[in-house]
Amino acid sequence: MKNRAEAPVFHTAVCAEPRQPLSQQENCIRSFPARLAHKELGMESKMIRKYRIGTPFNTESVTADIPQEKGLPEGGRDHVLFADGGRTLLYCLSEGEIIYGLGETVRGINKRGWDYISWNSDMPNHLETRRSLYASQNFLLFDKAYGGEDRCFGLYIDAPGKLEFDLGYTDYSQVRIDLKENDADIYILEGETPGEIVTAFRTIIGRSYVPPKWAFGLGQSRWSYMNEDEVREVADQYRRAGIPLDSIYLDIDYMERYKDFTLNGETFPDFAKFVSEMKEKGVHLVPIIDAGVKIEEGYDVYEEGVRNGYFVKDENGDPFVVAVWPGRSHFPDVLNSGARRWFGDKYSFLLDQGIDGFWNDMNEPSIFYTEKHLNEVFGELDEFRGVNIDIGRLNRLLSLVGEMAQREEDYREFYHDADGVRVRHDKVHNLFGYNMTRAAGEAFRRNRPGERILMFSRSSYVGMHRYGGVWTGDNSSRWEHLLLSMQQMPALNMCGFLYSGADVGGFGEDVTPDLMLRWLALAIFIPLFRNHSALGTRRQELYAFGPETEKKAAQIVRLRYALLPYLYSEFMKAVRDSRMLFTPLGFVWRDDMRARETEDELLVGESILIAPVVKPNASGRMVYLPEEMKLVRLRSAEDYEEEILPAGDHYIRAKLDEVVIFIRKGHVLPLAKAAENTVGVDYGSLAYLCHGAVPEEYELYNDDGISPAEF
Amino acid sequence: MKNRAEAPVFHTAVCAEPRQPLSQQENCIRSFPARLAHKELGMESKMIRKYRIGTPFNTESVTADIPQEKGLPEGGRDHVLFADGGRTLLYCLSEGEIIYGLGETVRGINKRGWDYISWNSDMPNHLETRRSLYASQNFLLFDKAYGGEDRCFGLYIDAPGKLEFDLGYTDYSQVRIDLKENDADIYILEGETPGEIVTAFRTIIGRSYVPPKWAFGLGQSRWSYMNEDEVREVADQYRRAGIPLDSIYLDIDYMERYKDFTLNGETFPDFAKFVSEMKEKGVHLVPIIDAGVKIEEGYDVYEEGVRNGYFVKDENGDPFVVAVWPGRSHFPDVLNSGARRWFGDKYSFLLDQGIDGFWNDMNEPSIFYTEKHLNEVFGELDEFRGVNIDIGRLNRLLSLVGEMAQREEDYREFYHDADGVRVRHDKVHNLFGYNMTRAAGEAFRRNRPGERILMFSRSSYVGMHRYGGVWTGDNSSRWEHLLLSMQQMPALNMCGFLYSGADVGGFGEDVTPDLMLRWLALAIFIPLFRNHSALGTRRQELYAFGPETEKKAAQIVRLRYALLPYLYSEFMKAVRDSRMLFTPLGFVWRDDMRARETEDELLVGESILIAPVVKPNASGRMVYLPEEMKLVRLRSAEDYEEEILPAGDHYIRAKLDEVVIFIRKGHVLPLAKAAENTVGVDYGSLAYLCHGAVPEEYELYNDDGISPAEF
């Protein structure tokens, strides 16, 4: 039985001075009104205009009923020029104009100066020159406040196929968006500020997913913990080291030969019992679910899928054969409501054994190869025998074998049955991960109505934010990915993805102790806080680097738990109010060129600015403060230093075991004592760090952490 | 006939005030003494100690006769602990201690915090997590001046096989150098300052290569300009755009089917005439030379090599078959003096047609596959037919075909005849590029004694710096590689590689206009100044981005030519005095922690500090000045602004067509008017920008640009 004693409540802190306990019971000021009146918002003003190009597939990313404009705007009347019948959008950028948005993509907060392609891709090497990652979130926000006319607007292109965004790549002053073959709904959003535009957009796409509170604790993952004992070892080591922990992740090897909704009976002989044992230690197990279903006679999921026609089909109507981890597989047709319901219900196999969280993977969907193409490859291989393989032939050979995965041609070879409408996959490619996660999310609401289930996904599209969070995929243990993991947050927030985060320490390649510590010092502010690493890489658990690093890591992670009351409150308010959790400085200080160009600082919630050290061998960094702030150098909830700093540039030192934050004037930061896990965080003994404010000015939220958040 | 009218001379500028012409003839103060008395320096003090482990191969990287210490130091007596008979070196790092050096490697100026492997590798993806690039320069410089005991020392490990440098990777406070199987000469170098240690090291390894002066001009390259007309078009476009140009590079397609020392007669029908035509336009052609010699009956180079036994051999004594561009090929045995002389003389095929510069490529040596392994691969491929290829089999298939290149096993399959001594290649792997370039350099001295020939190489080892420069290989059009190209310079300088540089704009991937301009603004300070890009990437010639970018690029490149008197003088003085051309701030301000940690600023020569903008969408950057300096914002030799700035942090704006430099107090910067090429730079009308100094305090160097530099 879950503890439902605590109703979800927002408090306004009432302690007269910092560090005085706040009783939750006395201070329940109000609960959230259900105020997401989508229809009204869209209709009552011309804040949002919708143009339709052709007859687009209904992605259901927008939940509000926005009336469609008649025709297209002529010339550049509605900010952008609709050329080529609206299939090419043109826009001329001003000097200093910023382009925010585009969700989970590479490069900085300002997306200007590169060419991005919306095409969900399993691409593990997140170079600054990548055009596509795992997600497509086609929302842009243009802001030219500085140095001229003050104007911002939002642009959302609801089109689920391939799109190209030339955002000053060919010419630094030109935007060219090519819808390719896509039909689309195009939304132009007006607002006085970037924040207003984000709220307008978020309001029409529906409220963000809320995970259970324990999902705000630290999770430890690796590809893979192979059996019960390895999992126990992780939990025990964390406990020994005094590092709080809330969850351990199970990667693909917990299954029987990579078959969804099975368990390896040898390595996890009594799974339900083991789940229970770990829960008693305060640790939730979170298994992975893959998109592909193995083709194997006698495997119930495969057989049911075939019997009911629930898999995507080739042009002849036969289930389409792809290969993923288990080899030959089929994809569930998640665009079909029957298949979605069926696949979603399958998660109960694990829910029924006590599991309360999942991560959906490989759902771009990733294809290692198709059976059809594999046969072509082997057919051609013989041509390389007995001839001189010069560079021309060698390149052909290498691409033949090396480029069997993620081939665009393969995505044109299969079809969905979207409730009676046959759609070729490439036309709706970017919707797969969204709808796989929706399948699960809808099932959880049916099958576990009184409970929040953790769910996040690798691939996504706008709309999926209502059903789960995202992690940003297979990053690497690189300093540049530490910075990237920070820069991706605001763009995800704009599209409603609040419960999100990158693999802390980096998934691929080998992390170093100093990189791990610096990464932690950022990641403690990010909702999805999971240390994850790949097969074959250096061990990355926080106790794996020796006692010195372990001690420092413990100190930083404990700060996460001290910050939990703040982070959880800010998360919930960002959900409730459809606003950003991570805000670029340029959103707030729009006419401050320095703030606009700051790419390595963020506001987290309403009260604090963070400026993590993101470079090796640095004992500190320069920090730009757009206004006076209070520096707090945190070592623990009890051990910290404060200093008021004026606006301007400051060199700020930060040791490897310190976290430096900056409290905005007029704001409050509640701080708890650290705990072993999220359940142990004591809201009864909060301290309040204030800068020109009193604790009453802070709106604190708490609940039982499990019941659906009804505000 | 070359113009020998101008003797090489150093001037001390004598103009009484800035911008007054300086007559060269009147002001020849002195020429360089031949003062590289290697033996004396090594013997007269205990500045340098040499320890021998086993019986190392004589790499000839050190030219001085340093006596060998008897035995090894016990305990940690000589800075490092010689464990395992000297095959493992251990050292404990202090807080704030910096490790400089290691030549051409990834990451920052401070190499601490990563694990590097000396193993020359053709690896085009220069990630921060790469362990090996194309070169091995095993020189390290430890400096712990800040925050405690003041101590620095140098460490050079002369061992031509694989070495591993764990420089705080496993444990941030520990250095562990693993010589693997190598015998080695280990040198410990003492000095009061990092600069002294560099000079000591450079003195024992011999004077750096000096290219012709025209090689300091801009070069334009691409893989490949396919015929005469394409080359003419490049030259004409540069002329039309008003962008100075001194050379155009010919990549592999100028040859007949990638055969060294041949010409494609269809695309370059009268090469000598064409070379002459281009020289009349002020443009030198620079062809590439590859390490591998194609196996083809009737091809003279192949046949001569086989006949004389000049190729490396397999264990049976037959020429070893590798594959590179042309397919099946042999490598010349450049460790054999006869083969070296033969191969070097081959360059005369092109010298005799008027060519006066080359670049040596693929000389790690890169192996696309070996014939032996290819047969193994095809043998195993059949096992994949008709079975379910799950992830295990798929990974095997992908690595089987995808990892045929640069296999370590292949480097253990062939042998050198080092003048009578048979050596398995892997034991001396890192010497190949060095000795290929030495073959050319020795031949040039024999065959063109009165002339400097441009020569630089992709692969290198300490010692090669006497025969040619290096370019840093196949980088990419990434902002992080712009920064990397700057950070690599000091470490190359330490090992004598003064004529060096990265491909400007990036070789692989697609450059953007803003990245190209920012890269130029750095690269105008770097001796090897070549814009180069790969097959299949966006066109990268400076006229290819439209008129706006072209104009800005012209403005920046013209500054290179305005700076030429300074850059050429500083280069020559760095050669003469065995000192750095690019100096990290920490070398000069050793007790200034901020200077020590500055990774994106450098001193260039004696007078100026540079701090280029290395990030996108930035209208400027923070610059740390360790002392008062004079900012000069250059748009041309005639159009600039000056401002004295105090020590400290400054936000400095820099537009895309501006170059901001900082003149050190007590220093002088000569500035010429721009010109169409290096020949046109007028030393008779120099201006002198001074900061607390007078022009007389500047030692200016000039010569005819072609005669060997005898100072």
Image (spheres, coloured by chain):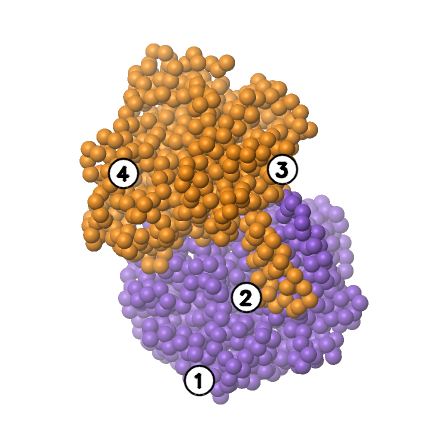
Chain colours: A purple, B orange
Looking at this view, name the residue that lies furthest to the right: A316
Secondary element under disc 4, as helix, strand or loop, is helix
Q: What subunit carries mark 2?
A: A
Residue A630 appears in view: no
Question: Where's residue B301, x and y in %?
Answer: 57, 32
- Front label number (2 vs 4): 4
x and y percent of residue B107 in the render? Answer: 41, 48
The quadrant where residue A456 appears: bottom right
B45 displayed left or right of B573: left
> As drawn, is B343 to the left or to the right of B142?
right
Dot 3 alpha-carbon crowd within 10 angstroms: few under 14, some 14 to 19, many 20 or more? some
- Which residue shows up at 36% across the image and 68% down it? A543
Mark toward the start of the polypeptide (4 vs 3)? 4
Task: Chain letter for mark 3, please.
Answer: B
Residue type at mark 4 is: Ile
Question: Mark 1 or mark 2, which has the lower sequence index?
Answer: 1
Name the mark on residue B296.
3
Q: Residue B197 carries which label?
A: 4
